[in-house]
Protein backbone atom coordinates (compact mmCIF):
# COMPACT_ATOMS: atom_id res chain seq x y z
CA UNK A 1 0.00 0.00 0.00
CA UNK A 2 1.32 3.46 -0.87
CA UNK A 3 1.88 6.04 1.84
CA UNK A 4 -0.81 8.22 0.26
CA UNK A 5 -3.45 5.55 0.92
CA UNK A 6 -2.61 5.18 4.62
CA UNK A 7 -3.77 7.18 7.61
CA UNK A 8 -1.38 9.83 8.84
CA UNK A 9 -0.36 9.66 12.52
CA UNK A 10 -2.70 12.56 13.29
CA UNK A 11 -5.68 10.87 11.65
CA UNK A 12 -4.84 7.54 13.29
CA UNK A 13 -4.73 9.25 16.66
CA UNK A 14 -8.06 10.95 16.02
CA UNK A 15 -9.61 7.64 14.99
CA UNK A 16 -8.45 6.04 18.24
CA UNK A 17 -9.62 8.95 20.38
CA UNK A 18 -13.05 8.83 18.72
CA UNK A 19 -13.56 5.13 19.45
CA UNK A 20 -12.15 4.47 22.92
CA UNK A 21 -14.73 3.66 25.58
CA UNK A 22 -14.78 5.70 28.77
CA UNK A 23 -13.87 3.68 31.83
CA UNK A 24 -16.24 3.40 34.81
CA UNK A 25 -16.15 5.85 37.72
CA UNK A 26 -15.41 4.87 41.30
CA UNK A 27 -15.32 6.77 44.59
CA UNK A 28 -12.04 6.33 46.46
CA UNK A 29 -10.47 7.75 49.63
CA UNK A 30 -8.41 10.78 48.72
CA UNK A 31 -5.15 9.13 49.80
CA UNK A 32 -5.66 6.43 47.16
CA UNK A 33 -6.28 8.81 44.25
CA UNK A 34 -2.78 10.04 43.42
CA UNK A 35 -2.19 9.55 39.70
CA UNK A 36 -5.90 9.09 39.03
CA UNK A 37 -8.11 11.15 36.75
CA UNK A 38 -10.76 13.26 38.47
CA UNK A 39 -14.29 12.61 37.21
CA UNK A 40 -16.14 15.33 39.11
CA UNK A 41 -15.75 19.06 39.61
CA UNK A 42 -14.51 20.18 43.01
CA UNK A 43 -15.71 23.48 44.44
CA UNK A 44 -14.43 25.60 47.30
CA UNK A 45 -15.80 24.59 50.69
CA UNK A 46 -15.17 28.14 51.96
CA UNK A 47 -13.09 31.20 51.14
CA UNK A 48 -9.37 30.66 50.68
CA UNK A 49 -7.76 31.78 52.86
CA UNK A 50 -10.75 31.25 55.16
CA UNK A 51 -9.60 34.15 57.36
CA UNK A 52 -7.13 37.05 57.26
CA UNK A 53 -3.96 34.99 57.59
CA UNK A 54 -0.66 36.20 59.00
CA UNK A 55 2.11 35.93 56.40
CA UNK A 56 5.19 36.65 58.57
CA UNK A 57 6.36 35.88 62.09
CA UNK A 58 6.23 39.08 64.13
CA UNK A 59 3.74 41.33 65.90
CA UNK A 60 0.26 42.39 64.80
CA UNK A 61 -0.74 46.02 65.43
CA UNK A 62 -3.25 48.64 64.37
CA UNK A 63 -1.66 50.41 61.36
CA UNK A 64 -3.27 53.69 62.39
CA UNK A 65 -0.97 53.70 65.45
CA UNK A 66 2.03 53.41 63.15
CA UNK A 67 0.87 56.27 60.99
CA UNK A 68 0.42 58.31 64.19
CA UNK A 69 4.14 57.89 64.89
CA UNK A 70 4.05 55.23 67.61
CA UNK A 71 7.29 53.18 67.77
CA UNK A 72 6.84 51.22 71.03
CA UNK A 73 4.16 48.62 71.73
CA UNK A 74 3.47 46.57 74.80
CA UNK A 75 3.07 42.84 74.13
CA UNK A 76 -0.48 41.89 75.02
CA UNK A 77 -0.08 38.17 74.30
CA UNK A 78 0.51 35.57 71.59
CA UNK A 79 -1.96 34.41 68.96
CA UNK A 80 -1.59 30.64 68.58
CA UNK A 81 -2.43 28.79 65.37
CA UNK A 82 -5.77 27.01 65.54
CA UNK A 83 -7.06 29.23 68.37
CA UNK A 84 -9.92 31.76 68.17
CA UNK A 85 -8.71 35.27 67.37
CA UNK A 86 -7.70 37.46 70.27
CA UNK A 87 -8.82 41.09 70.32
CA UNK A 88 -6.36 43.95 70.59
CA UNK A 89 -7.09 45.82 73.83
CA UNK A 90 -5.62 49.19 72.86
CA UNK A 91 -3.67 51.03 70.13
CA UNK A 92 -0.52 51.03 72.28
CA UNK A 93 -0.45 47.22 72.35
CA UNK A 94 0.64 44.45 69.97
CA UNK A 95 0.02 40.73 69.75
CA UNK A 96 2.76 38.32 68.76
CA UNK A 97 1.76 36.24 65.73
CA UNK A 98 3.22 33.38 63.73
CA UNK A 99 2.96 32.66 60.01
CA UNK A 100 -0.36 31.00 59.22
CA UNK A 101 -2.28 32.16 62.29
CA UNK A 102 -5.49 34.16 62.12
CA UNK A 103 -5.02 37.94 62.31
CA UNK A 104 -6.18 39.14 65.76
CA UNK A 105 -9.25 41.36 65.85
CA UNK A 106 -8.40 45.06 65.91
CA UNK A 107 -5.12 44.47 64.05
CA UNK A 108 -4.54 45.13 60.38
CA UNK A 109 -0.77 45.09 59.99
CA UNK A 110 2.07 42.68 60.76
CA UNK A 111 5.60 43.85 61.53
CA UNK A 112 8.23 41.10 61.07
CA UNK A 113 10.55 40.22 63.93
CA UNK A 114 13.45 41.36 61.74
CA UNK A 115 12.21 44.97 62.08
CA UNK A 116 11.70 45.04 65.86
CA UNK A 117 13.46 44.38 69.14
CA UNK A 118 11.56 42.95 72.11
CA UNK A 119 12.70 43.65 75.65
CA UNK A 120 10.71 43.38 78.86
CA UNK A 121 7.58 42.59 76.86
CA UNK A 122 7.89 45.78 74.86
CA UNK A 123 8.42 45.81 71.09
CA UNK A 124 10.58 48.68 69.79
CA UNK A 125 10.35 49.35 66.07
CA UNK A 126 13.36 49.90 63.84
CA UNK A 127 13.55 52.51 61.13
CA UNK A 128 11.57 52.33 57.89
CA UNK A 129 8.65 50.22 59.10
CA UNK A 130 5.87 50.20 56.51
CA UNK A 131 2.56 51.39 57.94
CA UNK A 132 0.35 50.18 55.08
CA UNK A 133 -2.83 48.46 56.22
CA UNK A 134 -2.77 44.68 55.79
CA UNK A 135 0.97 44.60 55.25
CA UNK A 136 2.14 40.94 55.49
CA UNK A 137 -1.46 39.74 55.70
CA UNK A 138 -2.97 37.22 53.26
CA UNK A 139 -6.50 38.55 52.98
CA UNK A 140 -9.52 36.30 53.34
CA UNK A 141 -10.84 35.10 49.98
CA UNK A 142 -7.92 36.55 48.01
CA UNK A 143 -7.13 33.11 46.49
CA UNK A 144 -10.70 31.95 45.86
CA UNK A 145 -14.22 32.35 47.12
CA UNK A 146 -16.58 29.81 48.61
CA UNK A 147 -18.22 27.81 45.81
CA UNK A 148 -15.54 28.67 43.23
CA UNK A 149 -14.48 25.92 40.85
CA UNK A 150 -11.13 24.61 42.09
CA UNK A 151 -10.58 21.46 40.00
CA UNK A 152 -12.31 20.39 36.80
CA UNK A 153 -13.27 16.85 35.86
CA UNK A 154 -10.47 15.40 33.75
CA UNK A 155 -7.69 16.76 35.93
CA UNK A 156 -4.76 14.48 36.74
CA UNK A 157 -4.47 14.21 40.51
CA UNK A 158 -0.86 14.94 41.43
CA UNK A 159 0.35 16.19 44.81
CA UNK A 160 -0.86 19.81 44.31
CA UNK A 161 -4.31 18.73 43.13
CA UNK A 162 -4.68 16.29 46.03
CA UNK A 163 -3.87 19.16 48.41
CA UNK A 164 -6.56 21.31 46.75
CA UNK A 165 -9.13 18.52 47.08
CA UNK A 166 -8.22 18.07 50.75
CA UNK A 167 -8.58 21.82 51.35
CA UNK A 168 -12.11 21.57 49.92
CA UNK A 169 -12.96 18.95 52.55
CA UNK A 170 -13.10 16.04 50.10
CA UNK A 171 -12.46 12.83 52.05
CA UNK A 172 -13.37 10.82 48.94
CA UNK A 173 -13.38 11.78 45.27
CA UNK A 174 -14.78 10.25 42.11
CA UNK A 175 -12.06 9.10 39.74
CA UNK A 176 -11.75 6.85 36.70
CA UNK A 177 -11.29 3.19 37.43
CA UNK A 178 -7.89 1.83 36.54
CA UNK A 179 -8.04 -0.01 33.20
CA UNK A 180 -7.42 -3.74 33.24
CA UNK A 181 -4.68 -4.10 30.63
CA UNK A 182 -3.32 -7.33 29.14
CA UNK A 183 0.06 -7.20 27.38
CA UNK A 184 0.40 -10.09 24.93
CA UNK A 185 3.54 -11.11 23.09
CA UNK A 186 3.17 -13.41 20.08
CA UNK A 187 5.84 -15.57 18.46
CA UNK A 188 7.50 -18.99 18.70
CA UNK A 189 10.93 -17.37 18.81
CA UNK A 190 10.46 -15.55 22.12
CA UNK A 191 12.25 -16.89 25.21
CA UNK A 192 11.86 -15.54 28.74
CA UNK A 193 14.85 -13.91 30.46
CA UNK A 194 16.70 -16.49 32.50
CA UNK A 195 15.63 -19.44 30.35
CA UNK A 196 18.04 -21.37 28.07
CA UNK A 197 18.11 -19.85 24.60
CA UNK A 198 19.20 -21.09 21.16
CA UNK A 199 21.06 -19.06 18.55
CA UNK A 200 17.90 -18.70 16.44
CA UNK A 201 15.73 -17.44 19.29
CA UNK A 202 15.37 -14.00 20.92
CA UNK A 203 14.60 -12.79 24.39
CA UNK A 204 11.05 -11.70 25.19
CA UNK A 205 11.73 -8.04 25.97
CA UNK A 206 8.83 -6.07 24.46
CA UNK A 207 6.30 -7.11 27.10
CA UNK A 208 8.62 -5.98 29.88
CA UNK A 209 9.14 -2.61 28.20
CA UNK A 210 5.41 -2.08 27.66
CA UNK A 211 4.53 -3.03 31.23
CA UNK A 212 7.29 -0.77 32.58
CA UNK A 213 6.02 2.22 30.57
CA UNK A 214 2.46 1.64 31.81
CA UNK A 215 3.42 1.19 35.45
CA UNK A 216 5.64 4.27 35.39
CA UNK A 217 2.53 6.26 34.48
CA UNK A 218 0.57 4.79 37.38
CA UNK A 219 -1.33 2.02 35.57
CA UNK A 220 -1.06 -0.93 37.94
CA UNK A 221 -3.60 -3.46 36.63
CA UNK A 222 -1.28 -4.82 33.97
CA UNK A 223 -1.26 -8.52 33.04
CA UNK A 224 1.15 -10.41 30.82
CA UNK A 225 0.85 -13.35 28.42
CA UNK A 226 2.89 -15.04 25.71
CA UNK A 227 1.15 -16.89 22.89
CA UNK A 228 2.91 -18.99 20.26
CA UNK A 229 2.17 -18.70 16.53
CA UNK A 230 -0.77 -21.09 16.54
CA UNK A 231 -4.17 -19.87 15.35
CA UNK A 232 -6.25 -22.03 17.68
CA UNK A 233 -4.12 -21.21 20.70
CA UNK A 234 -4.22 -17.50 19.84
CA UNK A 235 -8.00 -17.61 19.49
CA UNK A 236 -8.34 -19.32 22.88
CA UNK A 237 -6.12 -16.83 24.73
CA UNK A 238 -7.57 -13.74 23.07
CA UNK A 239 -11.10 -14.91 23.87
CA UNK A 240 -10.16 -15.13 27.53
CA UNK A 241 -8.45 -11.74 27.60
CA UNK A 242 -11.27 -9.97 25.76
CA UNK A 243 -13.69 -11.28 28.39
CA UNK A 244 -11.60 -10.09 31.32
CA UNK A 245 -9.82 -6.89 30.28
CA UNK A 246 -10.60 -3.37 29.12
CA UNK A 247 -7.61 -3.04 26.86
CA UNK A 248 -5.37 -5.47 25.00
CA UNK A 249 -1.88 -4.58 23.76
CA UNK A 250 -0.43 -7.17 21.40
CA UNK A 251 3.17 -7.13 20.26
CA UNK A 252 3.86 -8.89 16.98
CA UNK A 253 1.73 -10.82 14.49
CA UNK A 254 0.23 -7.82 12.66
CA UNK A 255 2.41 -7.53 9.56
CA UNK A 256 2.19 -9.42 6.24
CA UNK A 257 3.99 -12.68 7.12
CA UNK A 258 2.55 -16.18 7.01
CA UNK A 259 2.43 -16.34 10.81
CA UNK A 260 1.02 -12.83 11.35
CA UNK A 261 -2.27 -14.22 12.59
CA UNK A 262 -3.50 -11.45 14.89
CA UNK A 263 -5.83 -9.51 12.51
CA UNK A 264 -7.44 -12.73 11.24
CA UNK A 265 -8.08 -14.09 14.74
CA UNK A 266 -9.38 -10.78 16.06
CA UNK A 267 -11.82 -10.52 13.16
CA UNK A 268 -13.08 -14.04 13.90
CA UNK A 269 -13.67 -12.98 17.52
CA UNK A 270 -15.84 -10.04 16.46
CA UNK A 271 -13.28 -7.30 17.05
CA UNK A 272 -14.00 -4.47 14.60
CA UNK A 273 -10.94 -3.25 12.74
CA UNK A 274 -10.75 0.55 12.83
CA UNK A 275 -7.53 0.75 10.84
CA UNK A 276 -4.49 -1.30 9.86
CA UNK A 277 -1.22 0.43 8.97
CA UNK A 278 -0.18 4.05 9.39
CA UNK A 279 2.00 6.22 7.16
CA UNK A 280 4.92 6.27 9.59
CA UNK A 281 8.32 4.78 10.21
CA UNK A 282 8.85 2.83 12.37
CA UNK A 283 5.55 1.16 13.27
CA UNK A 284 3.78 1.19 9.91
CA UNK A 285 1.94 -2.17 10.42
CA UNK A 286 0.10 -1.01 13.57
CA UNK A 287 -3.47 -2.33 13.97
CA UNK A 288 -6.33 -0.93 16.08
CA UNK A 289 -9.81 -2.25 16.73
CA UNK A 290 -12.76 -2.28 19.13
CA UNK A 291 -14.20 -5.40 20.74
CA UNK A 292 -17.87 -6.27 21.04
CA UNK A 293 -17.99 -4.91 24.61
CA UNK A 294 -16.05 -1.76 23.78
CA UNK A 295 -12.60 -3.16 24.56
CA UNK A 296 -9.72 -1.33 22.89
CA UNK A 297 -7.32 -3.64 21.07
CA UNK A 298 -3.92 -2.44 19.87
CA UNK A 299 -1.82 -4.64 17.62
CA UNK A 300 1.69 -3.22 17.75
CA UNK A 301 4.46 -4.34 15.39
CA UNK A 302 6.82 -6.81 17.01
CA UNK A 303 10.07 -4.96 16.35
CA UNK A 304 11.05 -3.42 19.71
CA UNK A 305 11.50 0.18 18.53
CA UNK A 306 8.16 0.05 16.72
CA UNK A 307 6.45 -1.34 19.80
CA UNK A 308 7.64 1.42 22.12
CA UNK A 309 7.04 4.18 19.57
CA UNK A 310 3.43 3.10 18.95
CA UNK A 311 2.85 2.67 22.68
CA UNK A 312 3.92 6.23 23.48
CA UNK A 313 2.36 7.81 20.39
CA UNK A 314 -1.05 6.11 20.47
CA UNK A 315 -1.72 3.73 23.36
CA UNK A 316 -0.81 5.95 26.32
CA UNK A 317 -2.93 8.87 25.02
CA UNK A 318 -5.80 6.43 24.35
CA UNK A 319 -5.74 5.22 27.95
CA UNK A 320 -5.76 8.82 29.16
CA UNK A 321 -8.78 9.52 26.94
CA UNK A 322 -10.59 6.45 28.27
CA UNK A 323 -10.01 7.77 31.78
CA UNK A 324 -11.58 11.10 30.87
CA UNK A 325 -8.34 13.08 31.14
CA UNK A 326 -8.17 16.55 29.64
CA UNK A 327 -5.89 16.50 26.63
CA UNK A 328 -2.71 18.47 27.20
CA UNK A 329 -0.88 20.56 24.65
CA UNK A 330 1.94 18.51 23.12
CA UNK A 331 5.50 19.18 24.23
CA UNK A 332 7.53 20.76 21.43
CA UNK A 333 11.30 21.25 21.23
CA UNK A 334 13.86 22.18 18.61
CA UNK A 335 16.36 19.82 16.96
CA UNK A 336 19.97 20.18 18.04
CA UNK A 337 21.25 18.97 14.64
CA UNK A 338 19.79 18.35 11.17
CA UNK A 339 17.85 15.18 10.36
CA UNK A 340 17.24 13.87 6.84
CA UNK A 341 14.03 11.96 6.07
CA UNK A 342 13.94 10.07 2.79
CA UNK A 343 10.70 8.04 2.86
CA UNK A 344 7.30 9.73 2.28
CA UNK A 345 6.30 8.67 5.80
CA UNK A 346 6.20 10.45 9.15
CA UNK A 347 9.48 9.68 10.85
CA UNK A 348 9.83 8.96 14.57
CA UNK A 349 13.41 9.78 15.61
CA UNK A 350 14.67 8.74 19.08
CA UNK A 351 16.26 11.67 20.94
CA UNK A 352 17.82 12.72 24.18
CA UNK A 353 16.93 16.07 25.72
CA UNK A 354 19.95 18.29 26.36
CA UNK A 355 20.41 21.85 27.58
CA UNK A 356 22.73 24.46 26.17
CA UNK A 357 24.69 27.07 28.13
CA UNK A 358 21.63 29.34 28.27
CA UNK A 359 19.44 26.63 29.79
CA UNK A 360 17.46 26.05 26.59
CA UNK A 361 16.29 22.48 25.96
CA UNK A 362 16.99 20.75 22.62
CA UNK A 363 16.32 17.31 21.19
CA UNK A 364 19.55 15.56 20.24
CA UNK A 365 18.89 12.94 17.51
CA UNK A 366 19.85 9.35 18.36
CA UNK A 367 19.08 7.32 15.22
CA UNK A 368 18.81 3.55 15.53
CA UNK A 369 20.04 0.90 13.10
CA UNK A 370 16.47 -0.05 12.32
CA UNK A 371 13.26 -0.91 14.16
CA UNK A 372 14.89 -3.95 15.73
CA UNK A 373 17.72 -1.96 17.32
CA UNK A 374 16.25 -1.52 20.79
CA UNK A 375 19.74 -1.28 22.33
CA UNK A 376 20.07 2.23 20.88
CA UNK A 377 17.05 3.37 22.90
CA UNK A 378 18.89 3.04 26.21
CA UNK A 379 19.54 6.51 27.60
CA UNK A 380 17.13 8.26 25.24
CA UNK A 381 14.21 10.30 26.55
CA UNK A 382 11.69 9.61 23.81
CA UNK A 383 11.26 10.47 20.14
CA UNK A 384 10.26 13.38 17.94
CA UNK A 385 7.73 13.18 15.13
CA UNK A 386 9.10 14.61 11.89
CA UNK A 387 7.05 15.24 8.71
CA UNK A 388 7.35 12.92 5.72
CA UNK A 389 10.30 13.19 3.34
CA UNK A 390 12.17 13.55 1.26
CA UNK A 391 13.47 16.53 3.20
CA UNK A 392 16.20 17.62 5.58
CA UNK A 393 15.03 19.30 8.76
CA UNK A 394 17.63 21.78 10.03
CA UNK A 395 18.90 22.54 13.50
CA UNK A 396 16.20 24.53 15.25
CA UNK A 397 13.32 22.76 13.53
CA UNK A 398 10.56 22.49 16.15
CA UNK A 399 8.68 19.20 16.48
CA UNK A 400 6.55 17.33 19.00
CA UNK A 401 8.35 15.05 21.41
CA UNK A 402 6.83 11.95 22.99
CA UNK A 403 8.55 10.65 26.11
CA UNK A 404 9.00 6.97 26.83
Image: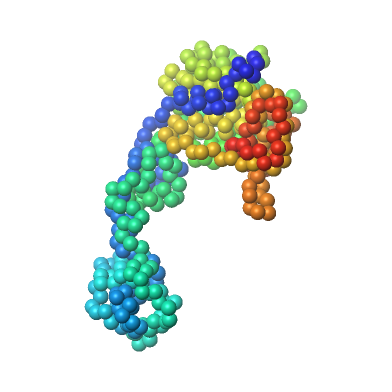
Q: Is residue 394 above or below residue 158?
A: above
Quadrant containing the N terminus in the rendered view: top right
Q: What residue is shown at x 37% (from left), y 69% (from top)?
A: 135
Q: Position of residue 391 (x, y in %)?
A: 71, 29
Viewer-proximal residue among 248 and 105: 105
Front residue (pair 215, 380): 380
Q: Nearer the viewer, residue 253 or 311?
A: 311
Where residue 322 sits in the image (x, y, percent)? 44, 31
**Which residue: 72% across, 32% down?**
392
Residue 150: x percent and y percent? 36, 47
Residue found farthest to the bottom: 120
Q: Is residue 304 visible?
A: no
Considering only vertical position in the picture, is 206 above or below 87?
above
Q: Is residue 180 visible?
A: yes
Q: Is residue 164 left or right of residue 347?
A: left
Please report the residue visible at 66 percent of the width from the left and 47 percent of the height from the top: 354
The C terminus: image quadrant: top right
Q: Going by the image, does 82 lie left or right of 289?
A: left
Amino acid sequence: MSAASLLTPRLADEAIQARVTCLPIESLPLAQCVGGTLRENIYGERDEPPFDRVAMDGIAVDSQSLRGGRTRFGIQGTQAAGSPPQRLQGPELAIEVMTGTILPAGCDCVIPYEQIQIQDRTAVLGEGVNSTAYRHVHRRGSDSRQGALLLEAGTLLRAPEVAVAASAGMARVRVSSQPAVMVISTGDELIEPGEPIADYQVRRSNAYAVAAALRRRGFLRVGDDHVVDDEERLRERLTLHLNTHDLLILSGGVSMGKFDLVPKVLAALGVEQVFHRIAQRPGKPMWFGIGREGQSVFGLPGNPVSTLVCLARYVIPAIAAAMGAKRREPERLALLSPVSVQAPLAYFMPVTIVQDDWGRSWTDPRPTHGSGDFLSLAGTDGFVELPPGPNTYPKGFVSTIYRW
